[in-house]
Image: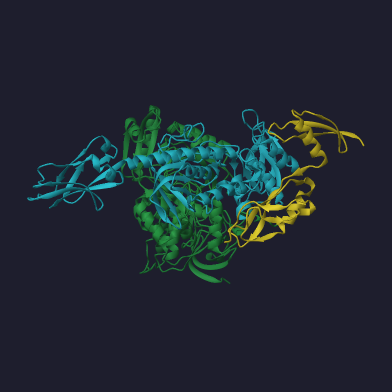
Amino acid sequence: MAKKNYDVIIIGAGVVGCMVARFLSRYKLRILHIEKEADVCMGATSANTAIIHAGYDPVPGSLKAVMNVQGNKMWDTLAGELHIPFERRGDYVVAIGKEELPALDELWDRGVKNGVPGMIMLSGAEVRRREPDINPEVSGALWASTGGIADPFAATVAAAENAVMNGVELMLDTKFEDWVMDGSRIVGIKTNQGTFGCRWAVNAAGLYSDVVMHKAGIRPEFKITPRKGEYYVFDRAEIAVNNVLFPVPSKISKGILVTTTVHGNTIIGPNAQEIEDKEDRSVTQEGLDEVWEGAQKLVPKLSLKHAIAVFAGLRPGGNASCKTPGVDYKKDYIIEIPDEVRGFVNLGGIESPGLVSSPAIAQRVVDLLKDAGENLEEKPDWDPIRPERPRFRDLMPEEQKILIQNDPRYGRIVCRCEYVTEGEIVAEIHAPVPATSYDAIKRRTWLGTGRCQGGFDTPRVVEILARELGISPLEVTKKGAGSKLLARPTKEVGG
Amino acid sequence: MAEETTKIICITCPMGCTLEVTHEGKTITKVEGEQCKRGKEYAQAELTDPRRMVTSTVKVKGGVHPLVPVYTAAPIPKPKIFDLLAELRKVELPAPVETGQKVLENALDTGIDVLASRNLPAA
Amino acid sequence: MLKEMYDVIVIGSGPGGLAAAIEAKKTGAEDVLIIERDKELGGILLQCIHNGFGVEIFKEDYTGPTYAQRFISDVHQLGVETLLDAMVLDISPNRHIYAISKWSGFAELDARAIVLSMGARERTRAQIRLRGTRPAGVYTAGTAQRFTNIEGYLPGKRFVILGSGDIGMIMARRLTFEGAKVERVLEIMPFLTGLTRNYVQCLLDFDIPLQLRHTVKRIMGSSRVEAVEAVQVDEKWQPIAGTEEIIPCDTLLLSVGLIPENELSKKAGVVLDPVTGGPFVDEGMQTNVAGIFAAGNVVHIYDLVDWVTEAGSVAGRAAAKYAIAQRQEAARHVKMQAGQNVRYVVPHRLDKESLVEEDQKLQMRVIQPIEGNVWVEVKDGDELVARKGQRYARPGEMVDIKLPQKAYDAVRKADRLTVNVVPR
């Protein structure tokens, strides 16, 4: 017997799941949002290049292309409503040497077919003017002016918070285990925290979307093959690239970018390596070497001695065929209500351009439900705005003074390299989607990402987390269960 | 008693000479490898009565920190180090603590006190 | 209450900063302030609870905190001011400091001289390109030392330490003393990078194995460290295939070097030597920016704290002398201020000593015409310094007044003189 009944249960709180939650929260629906990790945004969304793609790259006619271009248009409003750091700088696909120029034309044609507005071809000289450190052999670039950069953590957290503020119940540390079926209809899900009833379930499980759909007997041939991409992050005081720079693409990935990010750091990556283990986010010698070699092609001046961090992300790459007749593409998104099972909205293989597409995917989920006969009644008090929380380092001195006067905790710098204050940390711990681990705070505030990589702030963050959560410092974790930071009090032996 | 050779690194000065010490039990018959006469003295001490300064911490109640650092007023016999640490683990001082305050008097009957390294104010 | 202007502001209260502040005061700087980001003075010394400090300059074998305490007592005794739990956000090249703290809010301070003594930060895992997973349990030795000695928590139970520097070896002993197990110390170089006495008293004494020419190939464990894969390297630091060894542990400590912490220095326009990572300095520890000095690990990494104290003293003395000269220079000049009915006065400032030689002429324009007798007066507050009568004053005609030589004594004690043109 199901303990609690919902209209919709969403499985997975990456950017797609959280956007779906946020868009659905507009309607009079009882919604449960579950996530197996200790925080939102710990899967594919937590490690990527953070690009809001323009949309010239996906295969024309594919769902990826449609979602990309639709989603791209939604980002101004979305970023404004949810206060997500977002900048439309444009994507540059840079041709090095004359032999790469024809590839730009190919991308141009694709962009036109996909309905990408605002594309301009630039001469090598113009590219050099805009990006002085670019490889001097640059022969030209495709500038897709609608491309941009965003903070994927902020986007996910903001969407999740807005959903929660509008009535969605979010349960973390809650892992999908199996479906509760009534014949061929889904009526509930079993989790490690109990069984819940629902009329609709949305599969937004990212790397595990295949596992989830297989349990309902859907698309047994569908498989998620994780593709690892590794990155270097550079000290923003030492190197600052102005733009998002793509190389001319290769067969398996968009290529190794050199790009700025909304935080001002330059990052390079990703490479693309198919692996088996969905939990393997280790950085490798080979991967980082490949990234370094690729990046030097675009910006030869880069120096590894200014690299302050490395990380790896996993793309949830699927093998679904594109449904558009005449389009032969076997890695398209799955966004559908399958015929075989009722009460199921299936999302699968949402890899790049997943971030830009996420609001469009969420809107499509709403449309799919409407088409399936759901009478979606709008909440009169739905609030699309997620209020902004102050970031100390982005404020002018006058604003900083006022902030400190109103709450002295903003006067205590905890992360010296990134100027993150105690006030901000406390605000995130008590936010609608609370940050309860070191990494959760790091994702939201950018603390610990600078030169000292947490060397200075860690003891202070542990103290604040313990105090605010009312737990012992021994209970504070890096990223949820199993990752405690400390072992025992100094003066107690044994154990 | 059989004659044996033990290698000892002298730490009297930063040179760090490796000494080859030939001895019967605790009686030294020969020392080689030293560059000054302090080497012989160090070898003698290390063989017959090795001693170490010990620094650690003890618990504090009601202080600005939960621990205060402490030190032995003089080097203590090396075999007693871990017993001393076990004794220190039992200590809990009330704040405030003063620099040089006696934390353990005549620790383990060595005649050597353990003292506080710093002031620790009450919270 | 913080002052707006200090003679010397010292940033950081480790051994370098403490010595600088004390020497500055002893050399004659009147207002000396230390800004410290922690809640108490002492800097890194407070967590260095081992002995070996002060052997050279005091002929004593102090622990770090005891060594610091000596200077902290002097600081209080000499009346050096302190601003604790405060972070300096910015320093401009003209020595304007922005700092914030929970308790004093936003502070804007000026200094005649600044001593930078922010110390160093530790090299990170990313900087040495450690491969593998990113679980909890990877710490730099200094952060582990802070937890163990100050916060009162052991970061783990079973340790591998990468780096045979002093901090790593000291922590090996410290952790062993507190009942943890140190499995191995790995050092990539073919020689010990720390002091031999530490090798003997921290590793040999406790049978902790040291492997030279070894490093960590990768970290293992998804949520918490479960093991490290150690490997031998050749002369080019390349791993030698087949020498890998998986060492089970729950914590990896990194003791792989210190980097002078100069972000603030850069903001102040201080030029850094790429070889040391610290500012270019002269024999007085002055950087390229006039009035900004630097001392301690922020300049280059020291091995003995005694020499840090010495450097701090040099910087403190030089900073004080610079500040005193600035004071004297400022005191030499008096500012001329346009007062009642005066649009401007030229010269704007006057070297007081100039009156020794001869009278000085002040020139001005009035704002409103006064058709009638007027006084042109020069005042120090309410005290009249010089006065001249005129039959009228008009904006179109320049007005002047002589400051006579005999006004020297009055001018000498003034900070500012106001010039008025008023009806008689």
Q: Using residue A487 as the reference point, say whether residue C121 is left or right of it.
A: left
Q: Colour of chain C?
A: cyan
In the picture, the quarter occupied by the C terminus of chain B is: bottom right
Spot occupied by residue A227 in the image (x, y as percentages of width and height)? 53, 44
Residue A337 appears in the picture as rendered? no
Seen from the viewer's position, the closer of residues C171 and A312 is C171
Q: Judging from the image, what is the letter of the chain drawn in green?
A: A
On the image, which quarter does residue B92 sit in? bottom right
Spot occupied by residue B6 in the image (x, y as percentages of width and height)? 82, 34
Spot occupied by residue A179 in the image (x, y as percentages of width and height)? 56, 63
Spot occupied by residue A271 in the image (x, y as percentages of width and height)? 51, 39
When the figure is inspected, residue C225 is found, relative to residue B121, above or below; the finding is above
Q: Judging from the image, what is the letter of the chain drawn in yellow?
A: B
Q: Using residue B48 as the reference point, say whether residue C295 is left or right of it.
A: left
Seen from the viewer's position, the closer of residues B6 and B47 is B47
The number of numbered discs placed on residues in the rendered structure image is 0
In the picture, the quarter occupied by the N terminus of chain B is: top right
Residue A405 appears in the picture as rendered? yes
